Image (cartoon, coloured by chain):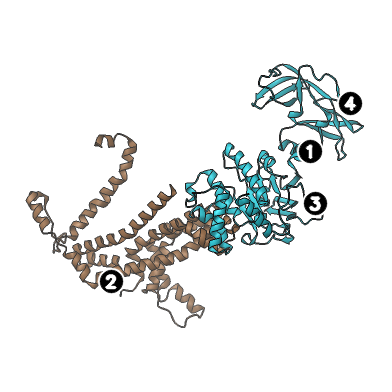
Amino acid sequence: MGLAGKMAEESSRIDAGAGPGPRQAAPADGDVPLLRIDKVAKKFGTFRAVDGVSLDIAAGEFFALLGPSGCGKTTLLRMLAGFETPDEGRILLGGRDIAQVLPHERPINMMFQNYALFPHLSVRDNIAFGLKRAGMARGEIAARVAEMVALVKLDGLEKRKPDQLSGGQKQRVALARSLARRPQVLLLDEPLAALDKKLRESTQGELMELQRRLGMTFIVVTHDQEEAMTMASRIGVMDSGRLEQVATPHELYEAPNSRWIAGFVGDVNLFDGEITSRDNHRLTIATRDAGTLVVAEPRNPVTKPNVSVAIRPEKVKLSLRGPATDAINGSSINRLDGVVAEVCYLGGSTNYKLKLDSGSHLRSSIANTARIDIDAYGVNQHVVAWFAPDDCLVLEQ
Amino acid sequence: MSARRIFARPARLAAIAPYLWLLLFFLVPFGFVLKISLSQTAIAQPPYTPLFDLGGGWTEIRSAFAALSLDNFKLLVSDDLYVLSYVRSLYVAVASTFMLLLIGYPIAYGMARLPRRWQAVAMVLVIVPFWTSFLIRIYAWINILQHDGLLNQILLALRLVPSPVVWLSTDSAMYLGIVYSYLPFMILPLYATLARMEPAIEEAAADLGAAPWQVFWLVTFPLSLPGVAAGALLCFIPIIGEFVIPDLLAGSNALMIGQTLWLEFFTNKDWPVASATAIVLLIVLLVPLLLYERLQRRQLEEAR
């Protein structure tokens, strides 16, 4: 246990009562969450940037706000930091409404998208800026800065100005500066967007490690679904100012609650159709483009007859002649005939686009588990695609 | 590098064009002024002794150099009039620049914080006085400030003063005229610096616990210093040599160096002393310019 370990201990002492929790899914009922966003709305003119968002975030969570650009996620983050004031609703931090509290009086810090480092101050003074404002003693400031520099591995760069740093180093300074005050909540606005791919991936891991060791609450805003899935313990997906779904990465991917989310998070095949019969937890759906499909009945009962069947590409298997039997574990399997229209080799997997007899397309992603793949299919080859009812999702239209 | 290589490419020609311009329109005239400042007054046309005659050959030039005199410069030091003019000019320029900064900074700051659309409008409002001749605007001020002018009429109508106040021909009128005339030159470079500043940097300061006044003093102001330096220099240098405004608005008890220059040239017809005055003024002005230049170079080196 290094410096970070000590810091985690100490910060848990400081935040007594709201100490670091485990990587939990959602705050338990009855518990007061660290942060409660209650029916918050923000308008710019007549445009509702954030439209009635309610959300609880527990202490120690790594939460991601995910959505396309303009969905309101940044506005929501700025309201948490205090740069925007909500028009409606409350923001409760440890039970206290902070919606009207000015930014410099909030125990919340933010790491800005383009880092917003102070160009006229050295790395050391950038990190010390918030500590000086807090009225800390000089010796204490020096110790904390040294701790932060070690934590983000910036040793030897303390006297540099931001202009003399690389992109990755600036990112670390921004992180150290926002962590230095040991905020109750750390907001990260697209923290990795300005880094190149390799650096982004390694920094993702470091951010997770840091968050776990410090036991701090992180809220990250991102438009990159892979980034959100990798780092966060829970993800809130936003669209047009509304929070569409809050779930763990696994839930979000395997049980999206709308067509839009199914398409936004990962790749998906969608077939519109009508429920024709239901028995023994199985729905039979007559689709327009893929014939009759049998799917597992979802936990939440489907009320409308018009539905969409969603199936992820990696759950669609391909073979030349189809499965040996038409039933697996006693339930029938969906099979579709088609012709390979496109092959996209990605190394770890190969993406196929099939043209079905109905004329519509079906995508399938096959993991390349062997170096010499005798099962590769070529364009124009006739194949059978099949998938289990349990792998399908039924979404209302 | 031979001349042929210098002129080999149009780009190089473009690079030496500003130097040619300076040589032709600054260095050569400066040589003339320097020459006049070292010669003696004479009742003649032009009113100074020719220093040398190129027609006279090499010996003539050598004897002319031997006759060079620094008498004019000695006069500048020995006579109070000149020293006082320089001191007053410096004082007026420093005081005016300070006032301009005090008035111009809030205006520029406010402009930079306006919505984009209104920034353009504010910019036009700052520039619009330039569409009227400078001299006409100063005469308009005379009109406003004179004994029965607009200002006194308003003050009397509002019963704020019992009798007309003397505004014209005072230092206050001069400062008013200077600040009014030079304000755009202070506002524009300040505005340019402030408008370019990333708003997130100020937000970051607030986020880290800085109260609004701390955000200003610790972040906004230090980052706007290049604009402050540019605006101050852009005002300070011409104000030192300012002639029209003090001549029209200030009283006649104390002169600025520009007025002294005018007096020597046109009233006393003493071109050599006037030239010496101009050269000393130039040297006085070079000091802040060199300081600014060094500051800028240091900033560039830091940025690298």
* Residue type of the residue flagged with mark 1: Ala
Q: CA distance from mark 2 to mark 1?
A: 87 Å
Tag 1's secondary structure?
Answer: loop
Residue beneath disc 2: B84
Q: Chain of mark 4?
A: A
Give the residue furthest to the right: A279
Residue B12 seen from this side:
yes
Relative height, residue A328 to residue A228 (above, below):
above
Q: Residue at x 49, y 58 (%)?
A: B125
The mark lying in front, picked from 2 and 1, is: 1
Q: Earlier in the sequence, mark 3 or mark 1?
A: 3
Q: Amino acid at mark 2?
A: Leu
Left or right, residue A389 beside residue A313: right
| First of labels 1, 4 by sequence position | 1
Q: CA distance from mark 3 to mark 2?
A: 82 Å
Colour for chain A in the figure: cyan
Residue at 80% x, 19% y is A322
State the residue position of label 3.
A28
The image quarter containing residue B38 is: bottom left
Q: Which residue is mark 1?
A: A255
